[in-house]
Image: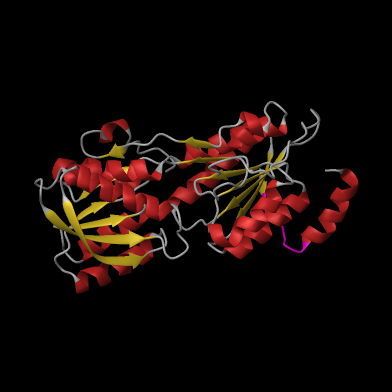
Amino acid sequence: MMKSIPKAAAVVMAAALALSGCTPAAQPSATSTEPAAADPGQKIVIGFAQQSLNAPYFVAMQKEAEKQAAEQGFELIFQNANNDPVLQIDQSETMVAQGVQALLVNTVTVGTEEAKMKEIAAEIPLIFIDTDIPNVGVAAVKSDNVTIGKGAGLIMAERFEKGTTIKLAILNGGPRDEITGPQRRQGFLDGLEAGGVKYEIVAEADANYSQEPAVTGTETMLAAHPDIDVIYGYNDSMALGALQALRTLGNDKVLIAGIDGQKEALAEIQKGGCTGQYVSTGLNSPSKATAGGIEIALALIKGEKQPSDIEPVTYTEAVGIGCNNIDQYYDPDSVF
């Protein structure tokens, strides 16, 4: 069950809550609260502040949260910030005022939100999923972005002779992508190097983890650098946008890599085999990250665990996916 909250409701609700009495992190926050166990007869309410719904990965997180709410009988309040950090802060504070007993956050940006999220973490359990603010909140459940990036890079390196220098173009997440993208970038470059391949980064374009701007970005990069060998997107939505642009241009030479394990990308890898254009991705399960964050939230709300019992960071399974292991991971019926 899910509902949205009007921003104006915060003031009225806060006053009502005063009468009723109604934290990822590399390390637990010093301001994290020790939550009191919920009354067994009390309705559990969990908030989810999502950074965006502009990519299938984020939509899959919402669907998993709704599924968990239906199966486990808690109320879910979901808000989409549309990549606006100020709006995400406002939505988060409003959910706290409404009385959520724990808050899940997939943060838009670290710098703008850190101070306010620390304040929220002092009031209720705050759990980050996918993208976190270091040293804030109880815990984070996320992918090991360096590892999955490296896995994708190693698989890409297999398509070239050792010692080759490739011309690399990158589709990135934009200026607010302060943690996830840079980690995925470093991992992929490390993977190329570990596979014996050198690289020259000849072009980059901001695509904000979305497919449509990745199409335009790819066209622009290719117009300036027609000799690009590889395009790497920090997620599969951007990489699929690159593939779309290449097919429109009739270019079947440039190789593609992404991250996340989106099923459309996995389908391309399976279809192309070990000579296909879409070469590799890295597994990052939105369902497992969301379910893991909810599991922590419920344990804290019910008093089954205290923040000190929770690992500050939990990583979901991290592996590079290519033609040799695609059958282990591709499920055409999966949500993502």
Classify residue 175 as left or right of residue 238: right
Q: Quadrant of the N terminus?
A: top right
Tally of numbered discs: 0
As rendered, which of 267 and 236 lies closer to the eye?
236
Give the quarter of the image for residue 38: top right
Residue 336 in the image, given as x and y percentages of width and height: 42, 43
Give the residue at x 56% y 32%.
311
Residue 65 in the image, given as x and y percentages of width and height: 58, 41
Residue 28 in the image, given as x and y percentages of width and height: 61, 40
Give the residue at x 78% y 34%.
36
**Extreme residue toward the top, this view:** 304
Classify residue 245 as left or right of residue 26: left
Give the quarter of the image for residue 230: bottom left
Q: Is residue 245 visible?
A: yes
Q: Is residue 126 above or below residue 299?
A: below
Q: Is residue 261 visible?
A: no
> Is the stretch drawn in magenta largely helix, strand or loop?
loop
Classify residue 254 as left or right of residue 301: left
Q: Magenta residues, as a range? A: 3-8
Give the residue at x 25% y 33%.
325
Residue 27 within the magenta-colored segment of the rendering? no
**Extreme residue toward the front, this view:** 30
Residue 50 in the image, given as x and y percentages of width and height: 57, 52
